[in-house]
Image: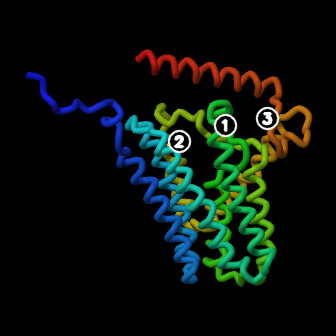
Amino acid sequence: MPSNKEQPTASAKNKGVFLLPNLLTTAGLFSGFFAIIAAMNGQFESAATAIFIAMVFDGLDGRVARMTNTESAFGAEYDSMADIVSFGMAPALVMYSWALGDLGKLGWLAAFIFVAGGALRLARFNTNLAVADKRYFQGLAIPSAAAIVAGFVWVGSKYDIDPENVAYIAAFLTIAVGLLMVSNFRYHSFKDVDWRNRVSFIAILLVVLAFVVVATEPSLVLFSIFLLYAISGPITTFRTVKHIKLEHVVGDTECELGDGEAEKASTSTKFEQKTNEKTTHD
């Protein structure tokens, strides 16, 4: 006699979300929210540190999702929502509370430019996933931009710098970083690095040395690293583009590559296609 109980459909089986990657995303979101609360209470070092902690969780959630085969459209959307809070709103409000508030209209406009630049950067990144060169970011990534703003506040708080003395520098830096996010400058994504490959023992020693250097003065070292990374974008673009035009700085047109760079990009694309085909067949 056939049972009246309905069999679960495929859509019913797929309901719910994966716990681990979304838990890491939530931890990053909490860190960004904590940074805002800490800044409101005048705890600027804690606020800046929380934003860097959010960067760690943001770097982990996607990699964990790929390693555990738990990628999903929900996770991607949730990650973007968390990023605009942790790396858009939080750094802007932390910087505004520390130095921009005394500048009046200029201060909140600078903070808004940063938030708007971050939102536009995320929207463009999400819509260009299928066509972008994986080796480069188009524009400064929002976590890196957040690290520069938060790092500036961290350095200022750590060394007891009077915010009134650097308020205009803070405004310029916030606006500049916000504009770099929506620029067409090319930034290395380091996605072509094979982290699973074997390395020499010297490389491990260099990694240990890097941790030691960061640990000596984390605020100053981290701020310097991300500031240099922000400067590397224009340098990389001007070195690889044959004829600089307005479209290479801002706009919808992608940058032209030199012959060597175009060949590398073609080779990289072919390698990714073969890898994807192999993964599909497997």
Mark in front: 3 vs 2: 3
The image's mark for residue 128 is 1
- Is there a contact, CB below 8 Å, between mark 3 and mark 2? no
Secondary structure at badge 2 equals: helix
- Is there a contact, CB below 8 Å, between mark 2 and mark 1? no
Spatial separation of the CA atoms under disc 3 and disc 2:
35 Å
Q: Earlier in the sequence, mark 3 or mark 1?
A: 1
**Horizontal and vertical percent for residue 174?**
74, 65
Q: Is residue 233 above or below residue 7?
A: below
Name the amino acid, label 3: Glu
Q: Residue at x 58, y 77 (%)?
A: 39
The image's mark for residue 225 is none
Q: Residues within 10 Å of mark 2 (few under 14, many from 20)?
A: few
Q: Is residue 220 above or below residue 180?
A: below
Q: Earlier in the sequence, mark 3 or mark 2?
A: 2
Spatial separation of the CA atoms under disc 2 and disc 1:
34 Å
Q: Residue at x 81, y 47 (%)?
A: 234
Q: Residues within 10 Å of mark 3 (few under 14, many from 20)?
A: some
Residue 253 shown left or right of residue 2 in the figure: right
Q: Is residue 95 above or below residue 123?
A: below
Mark in front: 3 vs 1: 1
Residue that mark 2 sits on = 203
- The quadrant where residue 246 appears: top right
- The quadrant where residue 45 appears: bottom right
Secondary structure at badge 3 equals: loop
- The quadrant where residue 16 appears: top left
Residue that mark 3 sits on = 254
Residue 263 shown left or right of residue 56 in the figure: right
**Horizontal and vertical percent for residue 277?**
51, 17
**Nearer to me, 99 or 25:** 25
Name the amino acid, label 1: Asn
